[in-house]
Image (tube, rainbow, N blue to C red):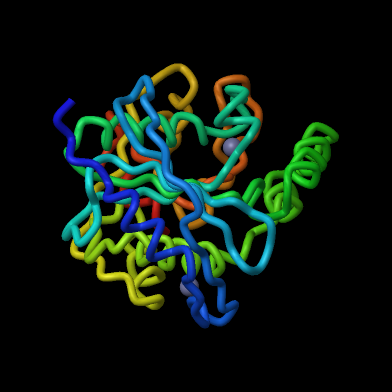
Amino acid sequence: MSLIQLPVQDLLRENENHCCDGCGPAGICVKIVSIAELPTRFGDFQIVAFSNDKDGKDHIAIVRGDVTDGEDIPVRLHSECLTGDALGSLRCDCRDQLEAALTAIGKMDKGIVLYLRQEGRGIGLANKIRAYALQDAGLDTVEANLALGFRDDERDYEVAAHMLMSLKVQSIRLMTNNPRKIEDLKRYGVRVSGRIPHVLPPNPHNEFYLRTKAEKSGHMLDLKDFKGKVHLQEQDDRPIVKGMTPSQIEALHE
Ligand SMILES: [Zn+2]
Ligand SMILES: [Zn+2]
């Protein structure tokens, strides 16, 4: 294994007494508390644990290679989803999205997945399950999405920006299909030098994306999964599935 790894002791020493006014309006300050090896089925990574000064959420960076002082580092932002990521729930495609990001970065020399502990768009696990139950009881998609909570993205970007700063990343290429996300991150001082499309391999669980016609604004809210259940959006970034037509890809951002 010849990957050059993070300078662990330097980072820990620098973070030990770190204190700042934080990023953005919420003024969130995070600091690295520990770094360990993380061999995975997607490749060898290091896992970086952060603490923050606002809530008890331990955000995580899954890092490949030495990204410190790095330019053009591929970065994916992923919001925690226990049911999808860990349990393999098919009510959402979070796990597919996470695996696609780890698989892609696992093949690169350097890259980062920021795993943000924002279960259910920040409303928490129990409330997310409540939204599922409402949907089971026949709530329409729009109502269910509202119950799930169109979360305030701002906080995520503030945390993400500070995490990248803590890792001393100089510039990133964001893995996203939504160019607007780049502007959001830039607001908090992240230098975004490019964008990498986030592409999922087609599988029986996401084929509903391929069947969906590219129509007008909001049509994505009506995505039905392979069992005819309405599919709620839990990550804030629509995936591209290999095989989508150009007009379907175009429609992701409408
Ligand atoms: Zn700080
Ligand atoms: Zn999910």
Say whether residue 170 is left or right of residue 125: left
Say whether residue 102 is left or right of residue 116: left
- In the image, residue 62 sits, relative to residue 9, either above or below, namely above
Q: Position of residue 72 (x, y in %)?
A: 18, 57
The image quadrant that residue 225 belongs to is: top right
> Can residue 56 be spotted in the picture?
yes
Q: Which residue: 52% across, 65% down?
A: 30
Q: Which residue: 28% across, 40% down?
A: 64
The image quadrant that residue 42 belongs to is: top left
Q: Position of residue 204 (x, y in %)?
A: 46, 17
Q: Position of residue 219 (x, y in %)?
A: 52, 48
> Can residue 238 be spotted in the picture?
no
Q: Among all residues in the image, which is located at the extreme top?
A: 204
Instruction: Give the quadrant of ligand 2.
Output: top right
- In the image, residue 191 sits, relative to residue 95, either above or below, namely below
Q: Quadrant of the C terminus?
A: bottom left
Along the viewing direction, whichever of 178 and 16 lies nearer the viewer: 16
Q: Quadrant of the N terminus?
A: top left
Q: Position of residue 11 (x, y in %)?
A: 35, 57
